[in-house]
Amino acid sequence: MRRTLLRTGLAALITAGILALSHATHAATRGGKMIYARYADSLFLDPVLNDANTDIWVLTNLYDTLLAPTKDGLGVQPGLATKWDTAADGKALTLTLRPGVKFADGSPLTAGDVKWSLDRARDPKAGAWSGSLASIAGIEASDGVVKIALEHPDPTIIPALATFNAAILPQKLFEAAPGETPEDKARAFAEHPVGSGPFVLATWQRGVSMTLRRNPHYWKPADDGKPLPYLDELEFPIIPDDATRLLKLKAGEIDGTEFVPYARVKELQADPALRMELWPSTRVTYLTMFAGATYKDGKPNPMANPKVRQALNYAVNKDAVIGITTLGLGKPMRSFMSATTPLFAGQDLYKYDPAKARALLAEAGFPNGFETSVLALSGNADEANNLAIIQQMWGQVGVKLRIDLVDNATRTARYRAEDFAMRTSLWTNDISDPSQVTSYAAYYPNIHSQHSQWRDERVDALFVKSQQETDPAARAAQYKEIQDRYCAAAPIVFLYETPYPVAFRKQAQGFVQIPLGNNLFEAAFVDK
Amino acid sequence: MTAALLRVEDLRVGFAAPGGTVRAVDGVSFAVDAGEIVGLVGESGSGKSVTLRAITRLLRRTATVSGRAEWRGRDLLALPERALRAVRGREIATIFQEPMAALNPVLTIGEQIEESLAAHGGLDRRARRARAVELLGLVGIASGAQRLRSYPHEFSGGMRQRATIAIALAAQPMLLLADEPTTALDVTIQDQILKLLTRLSAELGMAMVLVTHDLGVVAETCARVCVMYAGRVVEAGPVGTVFARPRHAYTAALLRSMPQGGAARQPLVPIPGQPPRLDQAIPGCPFAPRCGFVEARCWTDAPPFSQVAPAQWAACWAAERVGAC
Amino acid sequence: MSRAGLVAARLLQIVPTFLAIGAVVFVLARLLPGDPVSAMLGDRATEEAVTRLRAQLGLDQPLWTQFLLFAGRMLHGDFGTSIALRVPVTAVIAERLPATLVLTALATVLAVGLAVPLAFVAATQAGRWPDTLIRAAFQVGLSSPIFYVGLLLLTVFAAGLRWFPVGGYGDGVAGHLYHLLLPALTLALSFSAVIMRNLRAAILEVLQAEFVDFARSKGLSRRVVLFRHVLRNALLSTVTLVGLQVGTLLGGAVITESVFAVPGVGRLMVDSIFARDYPVIQALTLVLAVIVSLAFLVTDLVQMWLDPRVAR
C-alpha cells in the first residue's frame, strides 16, 4: 500500500515537475526589443485611407477592431467588443464594449469613438475599403453599447468588423490634429497615430526603419495575467533585397524577417540557430485569362470559348510548376479562393492531361493551337519561373505564349482598361469571408470578374443572394455552387497556394501571421 | 690630340622592330673638345638625333645601345643610373627641336628652371629664384622676374626656345647637345637663336654638338662638322675645309643640292634615289646606290673611315676623285 | 572673363537647363503607361475609387493646366506633395539626398584611391606581369554586375568576417560613414576600372612626350620625373573623366542602395517611378540634373586650375 502510494506520489511529482519545466520553457521573456526586417516601408498608417499591405499588416499592431480574427483566420473572437448579438431579422447588430479600454495616451475608448470610427470607415467618399461596411444603415452609440442597424441582413458584417479598416480611432485626438480638411487631419494624425493596440508608433524614418513602443494601457492580458505585449520595443528596418535580409538574419543583426525566397527555405530550416515558419495563407497565384469575345483591338479571342480555357488548364502540369517555382512549398489551387477561406469548397482541378488539352482545342476549332500573350511583372523570379514552364508546356499543345514583361503600374493600367490577353495574378484576402474574392473574381457587375469579362448570370445571382443569406448552410451551398461553376468554366489558369515564409532566430518567438497576412506581434518575445 | 671632352667610339643603336632590328646608328665615332661647336649634319633618318640621345641614354628601353661614349674619361653608356643623373643637366645638357613639346605645359618656366637648379645645386629658394631671373636675362628674355610665372603656352615660339635654353643652361653644363634647335622656328627667329647659342658657347666656354640637316646653319655656327648617312659618319673635319673640298661623294652631292649664297649661280642638283633601309645589313657603302662616283668595290666592301687630308676624315673609296672635283 | 564671372555665367546657365528638364520630365513621366492611381490603388480598386482619387490628385485636369500648376509652384520652390508618401516632396528628398551624395563622394574617393596608384604601376610596368595582373583584375571588376559584387562583399566582409554591418545606414556621421564603406567600395570597383584604364593609357602617352625626355636630360630623379612631369599631365584627362562620370555613378547608386538597404534617392527614384509618383519623379530629376551640372562646373574649374592651357 505504501509502495503504491509512494510510486503514485513520485509519478505525480515527476509529472508536476515536467509540467512546470515545460511551462517554464514556454514562459515568455518580458521586455527587450525585437527587430523584424521588412522588404518595403509602410506608406500611410490610416486604417481607412491606406492602400497597401505594407500598411495593413502593421496597422493591426497599432489599432484594435471590435472583433478580432482567430489565429487560424477563419472566425472571429472578442476584440474591443466582448459580446455581440444579431437581431432575429438580421438587420441589427448589438455589441457590448469591453470596459476600461484606454487608448495609448490614457484616454478612455468610448462608444462615441466606435461610432465615429465606423461612420468614417463606411463613408464611400472616404476610402477604397468602405464597401465592406456598405450594408450599415446607421450606428447608435451609448454607454458601452453600440447598435448597428443594417439595410439588409449581411453575413459579411461580422468578418468586416474584424477587418483592419474597421479599427477604432480616438475621435477627439484625431479632430485635434492639425489640418483644415479631414484629409489633412488624417495625414497629420497618421504621422503620430494613437490607437488602443498593443503598440504605438515611436519613431518613423521613412524608407529606413519604423520603431513601435509598447502601449502601457493595452487591455489584453497574457497567460500570466499581466498585460501584453511582452516586448518593450519593436523595430522594423526596411531592407528591400532578399539576400541582404537573410544575411542580416544569419549574422544575428535582426531577429526575424518576411518573404524568405522559396529557394532559401530548406537552407534556413537546416540552420540550428534559425527557425523557419510557414504560415498558412490566403495567397493564391494564378493566371487571369481574358474571356471577352474580342480583344480590345477587335481581334477575336480564342479564350472566349470555355473549352479553350479548360484545355489551357489541362495542358499545365501544376505539380511540376509547384515543384520548380515553390520547391514543393505550395499546394495546388482547388478553387479560385484559398483553402483557408471560409466556405471554401474545393476539388481537384484539371489534372495534367495534354492529350485532353489537344482534344479540347480541336473541338473548339483550334487544332493547331494559337498565339497569345501574357502580362508579367519584370524582375519577379516566381512569375518568370512559372511562365517559363507554362510556355513550354503550352508549346507542346500548339499554343505559343509570348511573355510581355512590364512594371506594376503598366500592368495595372492595361488590366483596368481590359487591354490584355492574360496576366499573372496574385490574391490575398483582406477579410475573412469569401465575398471579397468572389465579388472581385467571379461577380461580373463589380469589375467584370477581375476585368476578364467572364460572365455567368447564375453565379451573379447566387452571389447577390449570398450577400444577404443569414443561414450558414444555405450560404455554404450557394458558395459551393459558385465555386463548382467557376472551376468548370475555368476563367483562370489555376496554379498554387503558398504559405507566408517568415524566419526567426531561435530566441525570437511568439510571432503570428494569420492567413489574411496581418503580422501580430502582441505575444512576441525575445529570449535572452 | 688634346684629351677630348666627349669621345664617342663605335656607337651602335638598334631598335627592335617586327621586321628585324633597325640599325639606326651603325658605328659612329667622333669627338668634341672643350668649348668647340661641332655640327652633326645629315638628312632625316641618318641617325643624328638618335646618336645625340644615345650619348646620355635618353632613348627608350626598346633601343639596344653599344659602343662607348667617353665623357671626361668615364663611359656614359656604362655608368650607373645615379652617376649618370649627376652628369645630365650638370655637365651635359640637351635641348630639343620642338620647344612646345619639350616644355611641361602645366609647370611655369620658373618652376622648370628651378627644378634643375634644385636637382644639382645647393642653392636655397631665394638664390634659385635669382639665378633663374639671371638665366632668362642671359638668353635675352626681358622682365625675367615676371616671366618666371608664365606658362610655356604663353610664350611665342622663339621665346620658348630661349626659355628651353635657359632651362638647359641652369646648372652650367660644359656641353650642350642641341637636336635641331632651330628647325621648328621662323626663319628670322632661327637666326636669333643661332646667334644666341654661338654667343653663349663663347661666353660660357661651353662645347656644343649641333644636330641639323641645314648645311647653312653648320657653316654659320660650327667649327667642325660630321656628316652622317645611314647611321654612319661618312666625313668629318673643319667646316671650311669640308665645305670647300668635300672628300665624300655624299657631302659633295649635299653641297651641290643646296643653294649657297655668295657663290655664282648654279643649277641645284637634287640627289637621286632614297636612303637605304636600315633593317637590313648593308655590305658595302650605304651611299653606293645613289653615288655618282661609285666603284665596283663600293658595293661589297665598306670603306673605312680614314684620314684623307690634314684634319679631314672620310669613309669613301673615291675620296681622291671627289676631292679633285 | 574673370573666373568669378565664368562661374556666375555657368550657374546662370543652369536655370534654362532646369526649366527645359522640368518640361521634359513632366511629359516623359506621363508618357509611361499607367498613372499614380493605378499604381497606388492596385488591381482591386473600383472605378469610383479610381475616379475619386484621380480628381483629388488633379490628374483629371488637362495636361496644360497640370503643367502650368507644376511650373508655377516650382518657381516658388514648392514641389508639391508625394502621392505615395503623402509628405512634401522637398522633405523626402532632403531626407534622402545626403546618403546618396555621401555614398557617391565616398565611392569616387575610393575609386580614385584604388585606380591611380595601380594605373601608375601598370603603366610603368607596361608589358610585364604586374601590368597584366592589374589589368586582368580590373577587367573582372568591370565586368561584374554591381548587385553581385555588393552581395559578395556583404557575404564575405559583413556577414562572414563581421568587419562591417550587413547593410543599413547607421546613426551619426561616423556611423553613416562606417555603414557606407562597403556600398561605396562596391560602386568604386567598377568605376575604378574605368579610371584605371584611362589613366594607364594617359600615362603611357605622356611617357612618350618629349618634355619627359627633356626632364630626364636635366638629370632629374625618376621620382621627380614620374610625379611632377608624367603624373601631373596624365591626371588631367582623369579629372575630366571623373567629373563626367558623376551622372553614371549616381545611377549605379540605385542598385547599391537596394542591396545595402541605404535610404538614398536612388531607391527613391526607382520606387517613385514604379509608383508613378509624378511630383517626386519631377523634383528628383531636377535635383539630380542640378547636381550633375554642378559636377560638370566643378570639373571644369578644377581643370582650369590644374591645366594652365585651358582658356580662362
Image (tube, rainbow, N blue to C red):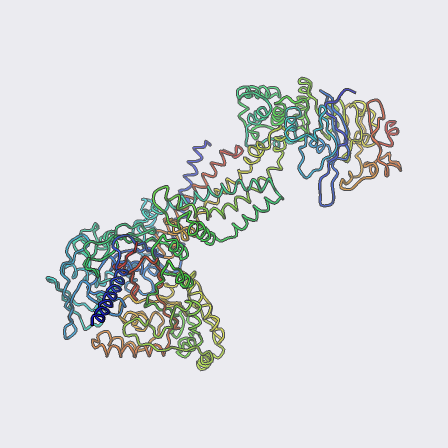
Whether residue C307 is visible to the viewer of this picture, yes or no, is yes
Left or right: residue A99 versus residue A360 is left
Residue B111 percent coordinates (x, y)? 55, 27
Vertical order, A523 against A306 (above or below): above
* Outermost residue to the front: A2
Instruction: Examine the rendered structure and indicate whether residue B244 appears above or below residue A248.
Output: above
Q: Is residue A14 left or right of residue B179?
A: left
Q: Position of residue B201 (x, y in %)?
A: 68, 20
Q: Position of residue B198 (x, y in %)?
A: 69, 21
Q: Nearer the viewer, residue A233 or A410?
A: A233
- Relative image position of residue B42 (x, y in whole percent): 75, 32
Q: Quadrant of residue A320?
A: bottom left
Where residue B217 sits, quadrant-wise, is: top right
Farthest residue, direction left: A143
Along the horizontal axis of the image, is C250 left or right of A209? right
Position of residue B229 relative to residue C23, above or below, is above
Camera-nearest residue between C73 and B148: B148
**Residue at the image position 72 percent from the left and 23 percent from the top:** B5
Q: Is residue A461 visible?
A: no
Quadrant placement of the N terminus of chain B? top right
Q: Which quarter of the figure has residue A56?
A: bottom left
Where A486 sits versus A265, above or below?
below
Quarter of the rendering occupied by the C terminus of chain B: top right
Task: Report the label total.
Answer: 0
- Looking at this view, is A166 or C156 the one in front? C156
